[in-house]
Each structure stands twice: as C-alpha cells, then as structure tokens.
Image (cartoon, rainbow, N blue to C red):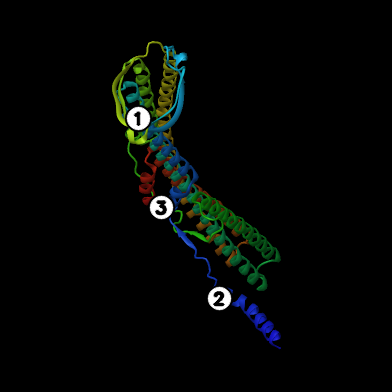
C-alpha cells in the first residue's frame, strides 16, 4: 500500500512539472538595437578586432625583450658542491715525493654574477625599432576597428533597407486586399466583371509572395548582423532606427584628403613601419661600433660550508666587431624593405584620395537619385489614387489600378535603393576619412 502511494505521488509530481516549467520559463526579451549599440558590441566581440589586439600584445612583448637586453642588467646565481681528485702529472706537475694523484677533496661555492651594458648603439636602435613596431601594431588595431565599424554599419543599413522593403510590401498587400474587396463589391453590384475580381486576386497573391520574400530577406539580414556582433543567431532582435534620408554638407575635396592623410590609421601605420626600418638600418650600421659593458661576480668558496671565504670580480669590457659579412646581407634586405614600404605609402596616398573622391561622387549622385526617386514616388502615389477613383466610379476597370500599383512598387524600391546608397556613401566617406568610429557617429546623427 505504501509503495502504491509513493508511485501515485511521483506520477503526480511528474505530471505537474510541465506546467511548473512553463510558468517559470520567461519569454526572451527582444533587444532593440541602435546603430551605435551595434558598433559598440561589434568592437568588443568581432574576431578581427580580437586578433589585432593580440598582435599588439605580441609586439609589446618583443619590445620588452629588446628593452631588457639593451638597458637592464642580467643577474644570475650559482651554487655547487663537488668532490674531485686530480692527476698532477697530467698538468705537468711532477716532483719527487709528491703523489701523482691528489684527492679526493671537496669544495663549495655560492655566488652571484651580473652584467650591464653601458654603451650599445646597435641595441639602442633595435629597441627604438621595436617601439615603432608597437606603434604600428596599435595603428593596425585601430584600422581593424575602423573596418569593423564600416562593416557593422553596412550590415545595419542592409537590415534597415530590408525592413523598409517589408513595410512597403505590407502596404502593397493592404492595397491589393482593398482592391479585391472593392472588385467583389462592384461585381456583386453588377458594375464589374468576374475578370476584375480574378485580376485583383492574382495581384493580391503576387503581393503576398513578395511580402514573404521581403520578410525572409529581413530575417537573413538580422542573422548576418548578429554574426558580426557575436550574438547568438536567431535571438530576438529588432532595429531601433529606420531608413531615412538626411542631406550631408561636406567640405572641399582637397581639405578632406589632407584630413584623411593625417587620420587614416593604415597610412599612419605604414609611416611607423618605415620609421622602424630606418632604426633597424641604424642598428645594422652600429654593429661595427664598440660595445662597452661591465660585469662581475661575488660569492664564497671553501673546502667546507663553514669555511667559505668571499671572492669577487669586477671588470669592464669592450667588444669590437672586426669581421661581420652578415651585416651586408642584412643591409641589403632592409634597403629592399624600405623601398617596398615607400612604394606602398605612395600607393596608399593615391588610394586614400581615390576613396575620398569616390565617396563624395557617390554621395552627390545618391542625393540626386533620392530627389528623383521621391518625385517618382509622389507621382506613383497620385497615379494610384486617380486609378482607384476611376475604378470606384466605374469609368475604368482595375487594370489601371494594378498597373499603378506595380508602378508604385517600382517607385518605392527606387526610393529605398537611393536612400540606402546615400547612407552607404556617408559610411564610405567616414571610412575614407579615417577615425571611422568617431566620424561615422557624426554622420549617423545627421542621417
């Protein structure tokens, strides 16, 4: 009887678990994401940014090693105890009455040794080269962040455009549904034919198909954005900003190009890399300079631990390099690298000017396209209104309405494309000018 009661109690608990679990479960909160929030999340989670930061840490480690080898002393400790015997005759010692082998005897030693460079021109230039390499690594990290900002802004814009297409597709479905209702009413009243009803049904089916496609593309754009942000794909997400047009006033192209040359992280990185190569050339030249150092040791040695006596050594040392054929090969290698980076700097300078000019051209062209598309959209809306009135009054069939709806759909798509191109041109200009994280925030505030 007791076992049966226990079983019934267990079954009751198991039966109640789904309800309890459902009550305790919470619906995932939908995240409303602004562009600036998206950029901030991408900068902390994007793989390219993390790798760039790791490369900076590696360069700082190399600089620390060079600093230690050039400026810091090397200190070591040594301790030993041994038992040995010696063959005196092997050392050329042979006296009457003296044994050939002495020992075994023991001795003990505890001591410290240190070495400090005083003058090392080659090492000093090597350290400076490592410092310039760290600077270049930090600039490369900043350039990687600028690229992340640009990509994230583009993905956010793509999602905004997809959301705008969903909205326009939904509007077309609403219009098509209203047209179908009107056609049915007129058909019931005997003022429209069955072809009008069928034509409206086809139009509604096509618009619903377009809406499904638009919604799917919007979801795909959110997945791509979430991947860039390091967010679990499919998590509830919606955009807090919508696609809209805002004109942007720009400066003269020459002013913008000069500003870009002083702000672009990739251009400044090449300059730092060049400085590092120059320091390496100086270090190569200084390999024939004398190197002055001081070293010494201090400790205790004796036949027993209690009988150790203090000993020490302090000496200055000058090292000269008399023959080092490797220096010539290294010099040629560094000269080749310097020539290569000079060519890269010149090419990037032209590329930066091209980027700025191309972004400005795209910005001006997109602004004109927006004006034309807005006019086309207004005209298409007016055409649809007139055709709907004519059909409602019975002066025309719904062919004109369906044609006007299609024209409006094209006009709305043209407007979305034009506004998207204009916003993307702003982001491209921000990337071309450098310091993208700051510049794109200013442009986004004006979009």
Residue 122 visible in the snapshot: yes
Query: Helix, strand, or loop for circle 3?
Result: helix
In the rendered image, residue 227, in percent from the top left (x then y), is placed at 53, 50
- Check disc 3 and report the residue beneath it: 36
Neighbours of disc 1 within 10 Å: few (<14), some (14-19), many (20+): many
Circle nearer the viewer, 3 or 1:
1
Circle nearer the viewer, 3 or 2:
2
Residue sitting nearer the eye, 220 or 198? 220
- Check disc 2 and report the residue beneath it: 23
Residue sitting nearer the eye, 261 or 315? 315
**Pointer 3 with pointer 2, Cβ within 8 A:** no
Q: Earlier in the sequence, mark 3 or mark 1?
A: 3
In the rendered image, residue 329, in percent from the top left (x then y), is placed at 45, 15
**Distance from Cα at disc 3 to Cα at disc 2:** 36 Å
The residue under the point 37% across, 14% down is: 321
Numbered circle sitting on residue 372: none
Circle nearer the viewer, 2 or 1:
1
**Distance from Cα at disc 3 to Cα at disc 1:** 70 Å
Q: Earlier in the sequence, mark 3 or mark 2?
A: 2
- The answer to which quarter of the image holds residue 259 is top left
Q: Residue furthest front?
A: 97
Q: Earlier in the sequence, mark 2 or mark 1?
A: 2
- Check disc 1 and report the residue beneath it: 301
In the rendered image, residue 272, in percent from the top left (x then y), is placed at 36, 30
The residue under the point 67% across, 70% down is: 187
**Distance from Cα at disc 2 to Cα at disc 1:** 80 Å
């Amino acid at each position: 009887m007791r076992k049966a009661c226990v079983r019934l109690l267990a079954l009751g608990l198991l039966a109640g678990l789904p309800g309890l679990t459902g009550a305790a479960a919470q619906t995932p909160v939908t995240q409303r994401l602004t562009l600036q929030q998206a950029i901030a999340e991408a900068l902390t989670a994007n793989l390219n940014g993390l790798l760039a930061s790791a490369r900076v840490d590696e360069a700082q480690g190399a600089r620390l090693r060079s600093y230690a080898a050039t400026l810091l002393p090397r200190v070591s400790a040594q301790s030993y105890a041994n038992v040995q015997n010696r063959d005196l005759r092997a050392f050329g010692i042979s006296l009457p009455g003296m044994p050939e082998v002495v020992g075994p005897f023991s001795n003990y030693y505890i001591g410290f040794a240190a070495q400090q460079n005083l003058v090392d021109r080659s090492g000093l230039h090597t350290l400076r080269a490592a410092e310039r390499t760290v600077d270049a690594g930090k600039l490369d990290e900043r350039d990687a962040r600028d690229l992340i900002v640009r990509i994230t802004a583009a993905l956010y814009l793509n999602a905004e455009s997809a959301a705008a297409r969903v909205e326009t597709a939904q509007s077309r479905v609403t219009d098509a549904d209203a047209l179908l209702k009107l056609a049915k009413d007129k058909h019931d009243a005997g003022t429209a034919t069955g072809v009008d009803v069928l034509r409206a049904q086809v139009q509604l089916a096509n618009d619903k198909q377009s809406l499904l496609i638009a919604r799917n593309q919007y979801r795909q754009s959110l997945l791509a954005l979430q991947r860039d942000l390091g967010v679990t794909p499919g998590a509830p997400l919606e955009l807090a900003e919508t696609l809209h047009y805002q004109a942007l006033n720009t400066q003269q192209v020459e002013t913008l190009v000069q500003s870009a040359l002083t702000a672009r992280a990739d251009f400044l990185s090449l300059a730092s890399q060049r400085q590092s190569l120059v320091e390496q050339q100086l270090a190569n030249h200084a390999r024939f300079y004398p190197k002055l150092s001081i070293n010494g040791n201090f400790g205790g040695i004796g036949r027993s631990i209690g009988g150790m006596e203090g000993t020490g050594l302090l000496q200055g040392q000058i090292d000269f390099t008399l023959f080092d054929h490797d220096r010539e090969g290294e010099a040629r290698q560094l000269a080749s690298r310097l020539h290569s980076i000079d060519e890269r700097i010149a090419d990037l300078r032209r590329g930066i000017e091209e980027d700025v000019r191309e972004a400005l051209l795209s910005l001006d062209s997109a602004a004109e396209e927006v004006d034309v598309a807005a006019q086309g959209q207004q005209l298409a809306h007016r055409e649809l209104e007139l055709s709907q009135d004519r059909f409602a009054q019975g002066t025309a069939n719904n062919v004109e309405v369906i044609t006007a709806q299609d024209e409006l759909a094209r006009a709305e798509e043209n407007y979305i494309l034009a506004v998207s191109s204009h916003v993307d041109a702003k982001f491209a200009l921000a990337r071309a000018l450098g310091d993208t994280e700051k510049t794109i925030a200013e442009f986004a505030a004006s979009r």
